[in-house]
Amino acid sequence: MEIGKRIKQLREQKNYTINKLANLAGVSQSYLRDVELENKNPTISFLSFICEALDISLKDFFSEEFETSITSDPVIQSIYRLTPEQKSALLQFLKTMQNE
């Protein structure tokens, strides 16, 4: 797996710029750019920060099944683009649907 390309793919699915993801993850924008371009190899710590900012686990980051589900399911793609507040509202809505 090409880690830089994976980060870029997940970042773009969330409609994040490099700057936004770097700010959310608390990492250097230039280092993130170098990782995406495969010029640098990230540490596990760096990947943990990126995954937290993308709201995924490290396991999901490396999971091909997770990758396939995101890229093929438009509902999942839409959910991953939501803000934390929108996700919370969606979760509350889904809970009301389950109680009917």
Image (spheres, rainbow, N blue to C red):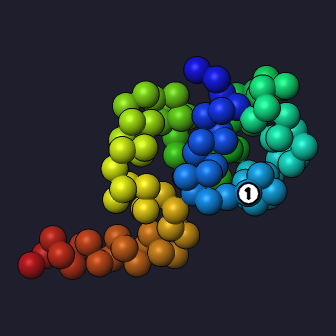
Please identify the quadrant where the C terminus is shown.
Answer: bottom left
Decide: is 63 above or below 8. Answer: above
- Residue drawn at 29 percent across, 78 percent down: 93
Callout count: 1
In the image: residue 81, left or right of residue 28? left
Task: Say which quarter of the image contains residue 4.
Answer: top right
In the displayed structure, 40 sits above or below 7; it is: above
Residue 3 horizontal side relative to residue 57, left or right: right
> Which residue lies at the image location 43% right of the left edge and 28% below the top edge?
64
Indicate the position of residue 39 as horizontal and vertical percent values.
85, 25
Q: Which residue is mark 1?
A: 17
Residue 29 appears left or right of 90: right
Residue 76 spot, x, y in % from top left: 38, 55
**Residue 23 is at least partly visible in this image:** yes
Measured as percent of width and height from the top left, residue 87 is found at 45, 69
Amino acid of disc 1: Thr
In the image, what residue occupies the spot 67% across and 58% down? 16
Q: Residue furthest left?
A: 100
Up-down: is 63 above or below 80?
above
Q: Nearer the viewer, residue 71 or 65?
A: 71
Position of residue 13 measured from the top left corner of the image (x, y, whole percent): 55, 52
Q: Visible in this render: residue 54?
A: no
Q: Nearer the viewer, residue 14 or 48?
A: 14
Q: Is residue 75 above or below residue 82?
A: above
Residue found at x 63% / y 49%: 11
